[in-house]
Image (cartoon, helix red, strand yellow):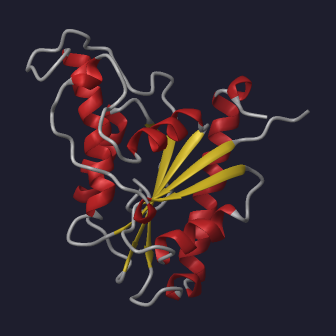
Amino acid sequence: MKSKVKLLAIIGSQRRNGNSCLLAKKVLESVEAAYEIVQLADKKIEFCNLCEKCVNSDCVLKDDFNQIFEKMKMADGIIFAVPKYIFLASKFLCLLERLDSIRHMRRHMGYKISPENSEYRLFPKKKPFCIFVVSGTGKVERETLQIVVDCIEGLGLKLVPHDLPPFFGVSVKGGDDIGEVLRNKEGTEECKKLIEKFIDSIRKSEPHTLHF
């Protein structure tokens, strides 16, 4: 039986079924892969309180974070589809902060400066990821994506870049109204190209780990 790539798309928008989600669905429907879409707009994600308990256990906060984290660990690759606000959506950034807090606590064995477990990664096998950013203008600062990519790669994930600027991901003009992004045929096609490259990189790197 041929193995199938299992993708997880995390939608960082705070608007349910908004343009970021519609774009991800449209793109994923075009590929031969199993996928799941998680909309952060449907989830409760608290801010980290630096309790340090995640050094030896799962995060103890009673929200949806641990469920999302488990899905990330099970996927063969992760797609982040996020809107650009002043920076990027705050709930998406909160998710990254929670992930990075666990990484820090386990690497430093608590809230310390000097690492005691310097090689620790949340995703030790360099799980691949890619990024779509949707904005009204279709423009996102390269510096913004650099910060986000650095944070995600610090978790142990590996970026699959786009072949065109801004290279860190695909920046898509979505407009203001829900559904407007689907009229951007060129942007959608660039996302499809990145997803095809993304899936190909997964199959070439670790074919024996794919889910059935």
Q: Give residue 126's position: percent from left, percent from top.
A: 48, 28
User: On the rendered image, what quadrant is the N terminus found in?
Assistant: top right
> Farthest residue toward the top?
116
At horizontal 36% and vertical 36% (from top left) the residue drawn is 153
Asked if residue 137 shows in the view, the reply is yes
> Farthest residue toward the right?
1
Instruction: Work out whether residue 211 or residue 192 is closer to the camera in this orientation and state it.
Output: 211
Q: Is residue 8 left or right of residue 137?
A: right
> Is 144 above or below relative to 14?
above
Q: Give residue 120's position: percent from left, percent from top.
A: 33, 17
Q: Hey, which quadrant is residue 159 in on the image?
A: top left
Q: Is residue 93 left or right of residue 186?
A: left
> Farthest residue toward the left?
113
At horizontal 22% and vertical 65% (from top left) the residue drawn is 87
At horizontal 30% and vertical 59% (from top left) the residue drawn is 91
> Is 199 above or below relative to 210?
below
How many discs mark residues in the rendered view?
Answer: 0
Q: Give residue 40's position: percent from left, percent from top.
A: 42, 59
Q: Hey, which quadrant is residue 82 in on the image?
A: bottom left
Asked if residue 142 shows in the view, the reply is no
User: On the rendered image, what quadrant is the C terminus found in?
Assistant: top right
> Is 2 above or below relative to 14?
above
Q: Is residue 207 left or right of residue 63?
A: right
Instruction: Work out whether residue 82 or residue 94 is closer to the camera in this orientation and state it.
Output: 94
Q: Give residue 202's position: percent from left, percent from top.
A: 64, 37
> Is 194 above or below relative to 205?
below
